[in-house]
Amino acid sequence: MPFVARAPTEVSIHKDKGLRARSRGSLRGSSPSMATDQLPPDLTKASRQLISRRILRQVLQDNNIRGNNKHPGTCLDTATSRLSMANTIHTSPSSNRHIRIKLTALHPLNNGSSSSHHSNSISSSSTLSLAMLQALASSHMATISNQHRPLQEVLRKAMKGMGCDERALVRVFANHKYQNPWAFQQLRNDYESRFMRDLVKDVKGETRGDFEDALVALIRGPLGHDVYTLDKALDRAGTDEEALMDVLLCRSNADIRAIAAEYRHVKGKDLLTAIKDDVDDTLFRLYSMVLSAARAEDAAPALPADIDHKITELQRATEGIIGTNAIVVAQIFTSANAAQLRAMSIAYQQKYHRSLQDVIEREFRGDMEDALLRMLTSATEDGGKADADALRAPLLKTLQNKKIITYRVLRLYWGDRARLYAAQAAHQKFYNKTLTKELKESLSGDYENLMVALIGEK
């Protein structure tokens, strides 16, 4: 049955100027479909539906819309199911000064009857209750910031008074609602505005050690923690090459550009210059290639002729000459995407009857070997095994580097869920135990509880 939208009423609520309402004419459509929303990203579906129904029901009441014998379906209790609400809320970054809500009543047409026969449409000249709309709008916008209120209070209670409720902190910080870093930042903003306190300072004041470091890393978010990790890796006697590789290798071009820009913004200096002061010349050349963000995008194909040319160059730069040409190998590895590196590994084995990994292990030593193998194995290992191995390796060491463990757990937690699931499956397949069990056997205390909760494995 076709529907007609009669004289939609557009209501503008201005913080300073009050209410305006005007008619926008008729629209026709084949179904009562919702218009595309342009709402704040953190507005939940439930709150959107709630405010829609409240406004629509009040509009029906104010305009005396009632069912009749001819159209019994438009009675007050069911009318909201026949209405479409197109919500467009325009806000400035600093204040909610202008809220515009467009309401459209949809009514069934019977046997092609004219829409003018229907008296139960919203009157274009109706004056809506200013107090009602302002109250609903205020409630609506408060809903956005209050979504996190229960957990804000849990956080404050956990860190208030004598002692700290670490388990409560784990429940909030590892809550699936906040796996998206933007959602977690909203929680932080709400906490700080509600209690007029700094969340980082509160966490640091109430927790200690590796548990504290991991909680603060979650507050920083992915980009902030990348920059923090780089700063710590470079800002001390002896560079933490493993942390450097964790942050910069096997990243997308967009990630690299964002990290370099944020590092300059936070530290006030160029990242490549900072690296140059801490690594040898060969490794510096490799990182200069990485930071150029010229890696083939994931969509770029592995063309057979190009792959054959690359493996020929690799053979000449390693086995084919006296003395290894590390720069050529680094250039090929840093410019290829995962699919291309995987194709090179297969083609090298077929053409030279040796694995490319064995060649790298034989021809290189130290940090350069580790960096090249990191790039190669991330592309060639069975799905998820490279991530599982990367997390397992520091867990098995007698002297554990908890910062490395935290970083690798968080990379999986913040990343694609499919990647996390693949790492979990690979760990079970190759080591016959869950990743969670590995964490529990190697870690302890509140830090263990947080890492296990972030992995989220049942």
Image: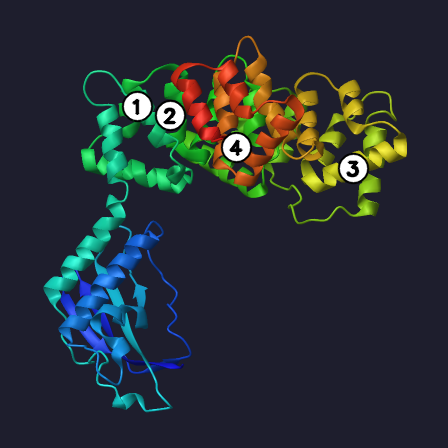
Residue 259 seen by the camera = yes
Q: Residue at x 18, y 63 (%)?
A: 14
Task: Compare marks 3 and 4 and give the one earlier in the sequence.
Answer: 3
Q: What residue does disc 2 label? A: 215
Looking at the image, which is closer to me, 104 or 248? 104
Dot 3 alpha-carbon crowd within 10 angstroms: few under 14, some 14 to 19, many 20 or more: many
Residue furthest out toward the front = 69
Q: Report the amino acid beneath label 4.
A: Leu
- Disc 1 versus disc 3: distance between alpha carbons? 48 Å
User: Is 242 placed above or below 419 here?
Assistant: above
Q: Which of label 1 and label 4 is nearer to you?
A: 4
Q: Which mark is residue 344?
A: 3
Q: Report the amino acid beneath label 2.
A: Leu
In the displayed structure, does residue 3 sit left or right of residue 240? left
Helix, strand or loop at label 2? It is: helix
Task: Compare marks 3 and 2 and give the one earlier in the sequence.
Answer: 2
Helix, strand or loop at label 3? It is: helix
Q: Quadrant of residue 125?
A: bottom left
| Whether label 1 touches label 2, CB < 8 Å | yes
- Disc 1 versus disc 4: distance between alpha carbons? 23 Å
Residue 8 seen by the camera = no
Task: Compare marks 4 and 2 and give the one earlier in the sequence.
Answer: 2
Task: Compare marks 1 and 2 and give the one earlier in the sequence.
Answer: 1
Q: Which mark is residue 203?
A: 1
Q: Report the amino acid beneath label 3.
A: Met
Dot 1 alpha-carbon crowd within 10 angstroms: few under 14, some 14 to 19, many 20 or more: many
Dot 4 alpha-carbon crowd within 10 angstroms: few under 14, some 14 to 19, many 20 or more: many
Q: What residue does disc 4 label? A: 412
Q: Report the amino acid beneath label 1.
A: Val
